[in-house]
Amino acid sequence: MKHLHWMIALLVCAGSNNAAAAVDAALVEDLVAANHILVNQGVLDGFGHVSMRDPRNPQHLLLSRSMAPALTTAADILEYDLDCNAIDDRGRSGFLERFIHCEIYRARPDVQAVVHSHSPAVIPFGTGRTALQALSHVAGFLTAGVPVFDIRKQYGMTNMLVNDVDRARSLVRTLGDKPVALMRGHGDVVVGPSLQIAVYRAIYTEVNARMQAQALAMGGPVTYLSREEGQMADVTQQGAVSRPWELWKQQAR
Ligand code: MN
């Protein structure tokens, strides 16, 4: 009888360990999927990265080692603290621009996921000619305003990378409380209250930029969404994010 109790205790313990591991594995799989989805949707290419705040510890984040995002697997996901030190990198190197992620999580408790990309259609809107503005309801979040970070203003001539804490903090100041900031001559950063919403926003920032370039090329004035329309549309779209997420995830497999 004593032996039986011991066996049951062992089984219960093993079961709960497996359950905990399974939850973590599902979250890591979502982050791996986010890497693949953003490549499939033309936001990431050989460059760029997506991270999520560690649900077990809000002072940590999960981010791939330095590699092309299309090739990311669960084994490539590293855990970092907010100083961007890897907890256990086992010799694997991190992205040069990982400080973007660490400093955003430090400054923005509302943010659960961050995308940094060289989203191609977005870059023309960071040059100073025309502001990126929402012209489709799926990009209503852009009506919050899209600030542009120009690294030259503070740092003069650089390699254009946000590859240290100081540059990352400067970028975070430009981002403010917004969902998106453009980086002149480089790309953008997109944040969200969940991984799914950050991925959604990164994709539709790119799509909206393409549509806006088309609308401007047609000539004449363009009617953009108002802030009120954008806010209402954003609430509705956030509530429906699981629909495109499941599709994108399936397509990325
Ligand atoms: Mn970059």
Image (cartoon, helix red, strand yellow):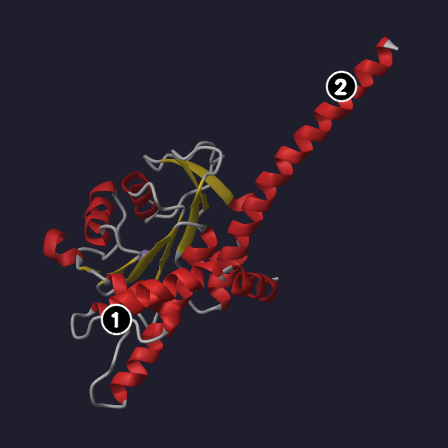
Is 160 placed left or right of 73 in the picture? Answer: left
Considering only vertical position in the picture, is 209 above or below 235?
A: below
Which residue is at 23% across, 65% downward? 185
Name the residue: 30% across, 43% down. Answer: 108
Which numbered disc covers residue 9?
2
Q: Quadrant of residue 134?
A: bottom left
Q: Nearer the viewer, residue 206 or 78?
A: 206
Q: Image quadrant of ligand 1?
A: bottom left
Q: Is residue 251 left or right of residue 231?
A: right
Residue under the image location 52 percent in, 45 percent down = 76
Question: Which amino acid does the dot numbered 2 rest on?
Answer: Ala
Front in this rendered view, residue 64 or 228: 228
In the figure, residue 94 lies in which quadrant? Answer: top left
Q: Which mark is residue 226?
A: 1
Q: Is residue 134 visible to the viewer in this orientation of the structure?
A: yes
Confirm or reject: label 1 Cβ below 8 Å from ligand 1.
no
**Mark 2 Cα shell of 10 Å, populated few (<14), some (14-19), many (≥20):** few
User: Looking at the picture, how far across and down is residue 63, in whole percent?
Assistant: 44, 45
Type of residue at label 1?
Answer: Ser
Above-or-below relation of 53 to 240:
above
Task: Report the side of 89 relative to 17 (left or right).
Answer: left
Q: Earlier in the sequence, mark 2 or mark 1?
A: 2
